[in-house]
Image (cartoon, rainbow, N blue to C red):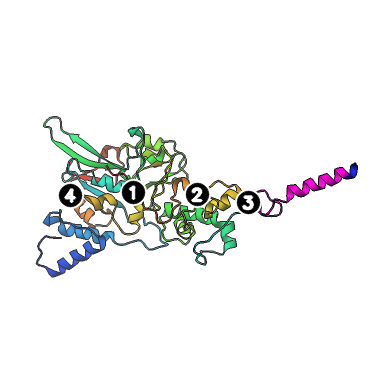
Amino acid sequence: MNAPDRNPRRAFIAAAGAGVAGLGFTAIAPGLHLMAVGEAAAAVEARKAGTSASPAVRWGLLIDAGKCAPGCTKCIDACHTENGVSEKLPDPRQKSQWIRKIELVDRRNGRKTELPMMCQHCANPPCVDVCPTGASMKRADGIVLVDRHTCIGCRYCMMACPYKARSLVHVPLTEQNPEVPRGQGCVESCTLCVHRVDKGQTPACVESCPEGAMLFGDLNDPSSAIAKRIASVPTTLVRSDLRLNQGVRYQGL
Amino acid sequence: MKLLRILSTLLFAAIAVSPAPTVAGEGGRTPKPVVTIENPGKCVAPAEEMRRNHMEMLKHQRDRTLRAGIRGEPASLNACIDCHASKKTGSVLGGKENFCESCHSYVAVKLDCFECHQPKAKFKAAGLKP
């Protein structure tokens, strides 16, 4: 919030947005400043108790790979803290990965790009298609979840997911957060911090990114910051040839 | 001789029944659950209804919350834990005095909720620091 601004009304809106969301947007370029504040303001609307998730909303993420700092793992740490992913495993291949960093290298010129990869919250999710028990499900507002009450741990969804977004919990757990239940024998993946989103907060990774590279919001609302950005700059759906219509988009790939 | 046998049988029966004070109930072999309600008077339904129907309430609520996304329902496992966790251990599990475990071990019903859910009130996970 250190960008000089002569308009007192705009400064007031910015201060209100930052105060409610508890975020600073210092890293955001002046041109994107107001959009970011708009995003924070849109995300503070908590859904009323007793109302169900609305199909009019489609939650989505826009990740700017150009801003993602090499070697930074702040989003992963914030995700693990928020969701209580702390188990130590003898085999690192069994580790739960709700979000992971991947590095793309252009072999012709050596250009490296880093980006966080997680559940892409598809509109047509293959994990939901293949689930034999109906545990893998998509909520009305586009968030793809696993119902652990019915998950039998068959891992069919892990094979179906083209983004390797899902993990199986291999060991008994005791350190769960009360709002994020997880346990042995169930498949899990990024929930888009559904417990935070329902309270009107943004996902933990978005809040933690020091570069402001992640933007969260309602893709269906043309006035939201994320919809405006998608309408104005070129963005990519990873493996768009699969026509899954993901909720997570990338910029600068 | 016969009288002596009858007398000894009666005496044996008396000895067998007598160490009853710690074994509650009418000749029951299992200790009765110790239900300590840490925050009384705040429950979402009367105790009789809770005893019979808490599993149904939680089952329907979990589907509404997870699948439909409805928050702030009166029945909620976290709200149960917040009130009923033992003041000593902060948990609803752990021993015969802890709220959930005392009854469930008495009636021998497996308590699956806490394979995934956190049994401690106000627990804050540390997460994995690199």
For mark 2, name the chain. B
Identify residue for label 2. B94
Q: Dot 1: few (<14), some (14–19), or many (≥20) neighbours within 10 Å?
A: some
- Residue A16 percent coordinates (x, y): 22, 66
Closer to us: mark 2 or mark 1?
A: 2
What's the CA distance linking mark 4 and mark 2?
A: 44 Å
**Same subunit: marks 1 and 4:** no
Q: Which residues are magenta?
A: B4-29
A125 relative position to B9: left or right: left
Residue A180's label in the rendered image is none
Is residue B40 or residue A158 the one in the foreground?
B40
Is residue B10 or residue A147 the one in the foreground?
B10
Identify residue for label 3. B31
Looking at the rendered structure, the secondary structure element under dot 2 is loop
First in sequence, mark 3 or 2: give its number. Answer: 3
What's the CA distance linking mark 3 and mark 2?
A: 16 Å
Identify residue for label 4. A211
Which residue corresponds to the image point at 31% horizontal and 53% vertical from the top-left? Answer: A58
For mark 4, name the chain. A
Closer to us: mark 3 or mark 1?
A: 3
For mark 1, name the chain. B
- Name above or below for residue A225 compared with residue A156: below
Image quadrant holding the N terminus of chain B, namely top right
Where residue A148 sits, quadrant-wise, is top left
What's the CA distance linking mark 2 and mark 1?
A: 21 Å
First in sequence, mark 3 or 1: give its number. Answer: 3
